[in-house]
Image: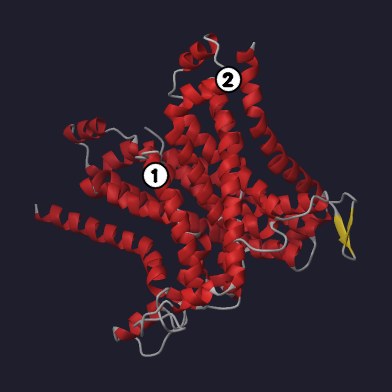
Amino acid sequence: MRRLDAIALVWWVAGTAAVFFMLAPLVALFVFSFSAGSVLTLPVTGWSVRWYRELAATPEFWIALKNSLVVCVAVGFASTTVGTMAAMAMARLPARRAGALISVFSLPVMLPPLVLALSMLTFFVGTGLGLGLPTVILGHLVYTLPFVVLIVYARMAAFDPAIIDSARDLGASPWRTFATVVLPVARPTIIGAALVAMALSLDDFVIALFTIGGGNTLPTFMWGMLRKGVNPGINVVGVVLVTLILVASLLALRVTRYRG
Amino acid sequence: MTLRRGPLVLLSPAFGVFAVCFVLPAAYFFVVSFWQVRSYRLVKETTAENYLRVFTDYSGPLLDTLVLAFIVATTVTGFAFFYVYLCRFKAGRFAPLLLFAAMLTLFGGYLTKIYMWRTILGDSGILNASLITAGLIEEPISVFLFNPVAVVITLGHYLVPFAILPLYGVMHAIRDDPLEAARDLGASRWHVFRHIVLPQCRTGIVAAFTLTFLFTSGDFATARLVGGPDASLFGVFVQGQFTQRLNQPMGAAMAFTMLACCLVVVSAVALGVRRAVAYR
């Protein structure tokens, strides 16, 4: 009995240490963003919102935030539309063929992001299409699509196709069938997939860095600050970014009632 | 008739996106990898010279990167396996909380995490300050940052949640009854783990390793920000071909060589894992 207690204690300590390792940097990020000093160390000498004020007075930050939001909304909308259509078609296919399709669509995610980003950079520049926010959106689209397809397909595969067929037989148009039969059931899943795509888009740094040409999204703006050295203003950009991503992903977990 | 045509019509936008944003760029990138750059201009002559130069000029960093990626992937897969095992078999009612903590860090921001590790491990960082306060050291020591260990910690921290996902998938599906039956029939805890739990985790282990290995071998930001001179990952050199040397064909050849090497390592590891934890 005593030996069992000792083993349980070891598991407890190890588990707590693991959670501490994973969460400590994020907690430190939020805490230090309110530090008054310009050196990030312990003990914190005073608290202020000085770095928030300074960042709010930087026009480049607002431009980067706007770009990030434009890309994220466009990607969320496009990726969800294209992905949902594909997932609905795949739900009609035999499971093995649908699985093979999912593997094919997942290839861009399996590659290191650097390779995906550089191949798009080379292609868009080489073919004279040029770079900009549209190419960032295209990059995020192909990167987020497998996640949307996977999430929506999992829901649609459990959906009885006979219901769709009867709606069509009774004379409903494809669009009306989707709006009145499919959407009411699949809406939480589709919204959840959109939010996951938006969270991935907000977080992406590598694809944005190479396909944006000029200008910044929030992560590439942060990269620029990082290369100039450590400055507590970076914490604030980090806080804004992490908050946006967390809100999107927590909402996604909630609406899809994801339980693992 | 609409039913037959339906799937293709619905799938076509996805195929279009896939072709324009992935297949065409990747194919073009591959073709470019055989071209040359002379006085800052692309020369469309097909030669294998770039690939030969990858081996003569960059085989050192390539090998270092594969070794480091192997270390990161093994460490992260091990840590994630421990974490998921804890959630599945040991944590009881705390399991959802532990999983939630892991998922919180999944979307915690890639650059943000690198930056936080830089401030934690740096000379005036949190770790040094804590050690001084605790009286363990007198002066800040700079051994934490700008070395390969910092890269392992930083990348490891970023990748753990991604490794947890596939492992949780497989371990969640393990049923309790066979484990209890084996225990009732006299199998030791180790035997149950080795011959019932572990074989069912194979695909998850391989997926976690593949994911983390590929990501690390293509990483450049972590190496640039916390790596220092001894941890110049291959990705830094690849990126340099595009931002400084403006030699896209060389960079493309380097990227494809790296992918080929990764494929070899990942296949070997997958085969090894399958053999090592096979059912008996």
**To which chain does the residue with label 2 belong?**
A
* Inter-mark Cα distance, 2 to 1: 30 Å
Query: Which quadrant of the rendered structure holds the C terminus of chain A?
Result: top left
| Mark 1 residue crowding within 10 angstroms, few (<14) / some (14–19) / many (20+) | some
**Kind of element beneath mark 2:** helix
Q: Which residue is at a point 81% across and 50% down the rendered structure image?
A: B32
Mark 1 lies on residue: A253
**Looking at the image, is mark 2 or mark 1 earlier in the sequence?**
2
**Kind of element beneath mark 1:** helix
Observer able to see residue A220: no
Residue A12 quadrant: bottom left
Residue B181 quadrant: top left
**To which chain does the residue with label 1 belong?**
A
Q: Which mark is residue A174?
A: 2
Q: Nearer the viewer, residue A122 or B48?
A: A122
Q: Compared with residue B46, is residue A78 higher up or lower down, i.e. above or below?
A: above
Q: Amino acid at mark 2?
A: Pro
Q: Position of residue B268 (x, y in %)?
A: 55, 45
| Mark 2 residue crowding within 10 angstroms, few (<14) / some (14–19) / many (20+) | some
Left or right of residue B89: residue A134: right
